Amino acid sequence: MGSTEDLDYPQIIMQYSNGFLISKVMFTACELGVFDLLLESGKPLSSDAIAAGLGASTLGMRRLLDACVGLKLLAVEMTQEGVYLCWQYLADAVREGRNQYERAFGVSSKDPFGAMYRSDEEMLKFMAGQNSVWSICGRDVLAAFDLSPFRQIYDLGGGGGALAQECVSLYPNSTVTIYDLPKVVQVAKEQFVSPEERQITFHEGDFFNDSIPEAELYILSKILHDWDDDKCKQLLAKVYKACKPGGGVLLVESLLNEDKSGPVETQLYSMNMLVQTEGKERTAAEYSKLLEAAGFGVIQVKRTGKLYDAVLGRK
Ligand SMILES: C[S@@+](CC[C@H](N)C(=O)[O-])C[C@H]1O[C@@H](n2cnc3c(N)ncnc32)[C@H](O)[C@@H]1O
């Protein structure tokens, strides 16, 4: 037997008496299915997602996961939302004149949505964020023109569907189809639009690569600002071709003053478009030019005085 003088007995005894806490944390994580869920998902999950997936409280799960990290049973990764990460490279975006997805995430900057939707959680947050603005100014943009003659409406890139919901409540004789990428439509159906909402239908598609069905009115809300002029012209030409004669397209966007001197919110949104997308905010004249290039005639512009404005082009 060697000398025991150097050992910190109180400390050792405390550790031994707490030993069961360690095994209890590990077995509880096993019992609740934490490791199985992470294994099945094949990718990191947030503590909220784990709590929701396992039917546990967010508060309790967060604490259990922290303890698992302390015990080296799990590793933690701190993430930031795409928008914050991209804004860290604002100076690079200004120097290079392009979005910063590649620098921020190491993924192609050509498809901003592919990059943004790289995690389901980020996509859900983005959809909820986009939706939230329409409870404040959805009515203003939809009532800027009398849309009641249009019964068959497609909301292209309709996302979580908040604007579509405002639209059918304002125009009860119309139906609105939310057209968006398949994974977005799935989430809109499951989490955002009530199944009892009979005036709303869904269409999964890619508006650049798939066909756009015939309709009387197409809403493009915060769509053109994501894309450069060539892509906008390509999309509007497709919309024009699909549109019924007498029909139209409603652009919902935040309009810059003609001399681009403001509004300041729109200028800031345009900086956001620079760091995150291929697009920009535009003036009413710039949108009118894009519409005319696609073939639309009679173009009317309504500034709502709120964050978003409306431009209507007729076929
Ligand atoms: C800025 S969000 C606007 C969402 C919604 N229109 C609104 O105003 O709240 C752009 C939308 O376009 C959709 N989108 C992007 N690329 C698309 C594509 N190629 N085909 C269909 N939808 C697309 C996105 O999924 C997203 O829902």
Image (tube, helix red, strand yellow):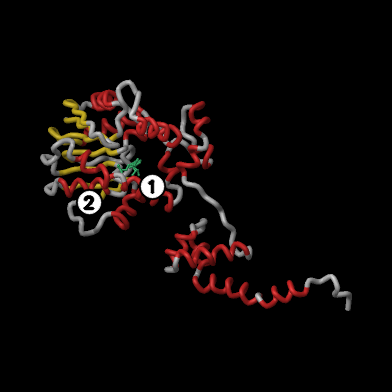
Q: Is mark 1 within 8 Å of ligand 1?
A: yes
Q: Position of residue 100 (x, y in %)?
A: 49, 35
Q: CA distance from mark 2 to mark 1?
A: 21 Å
| Circle 2 SS class | strand
Q: Mark 2 or 1 closer to N-term?
A: 1
* Residue at x 58% of width, y 75% of height: 24
- For label 2, the residue is 201
Q: Position of residue 53 (x, y in %)?
A: 43, 64
* Residue at x 54% of width, y 67% of height: 64
Is residue 165 toward the left or the right of residue 128 in the image? left
- Image vertical order of residue 7 relative to residue 82, above or below: below
| Circle 1 SS class | helix
- For label 1, the residue is 126
Location of the C terminus by quadrant is: top left
Residue 301 or 259: which is nearer the viewer?
A: 259
Is residue 306 toward the left or the right of residue 248 in the image? right
**Kind of residue at badge 2:** Thr
- Image vertical order of residue 84 relative to residue 11, above or below: above
* Residue at x 49% of width, y 66% of height: 61
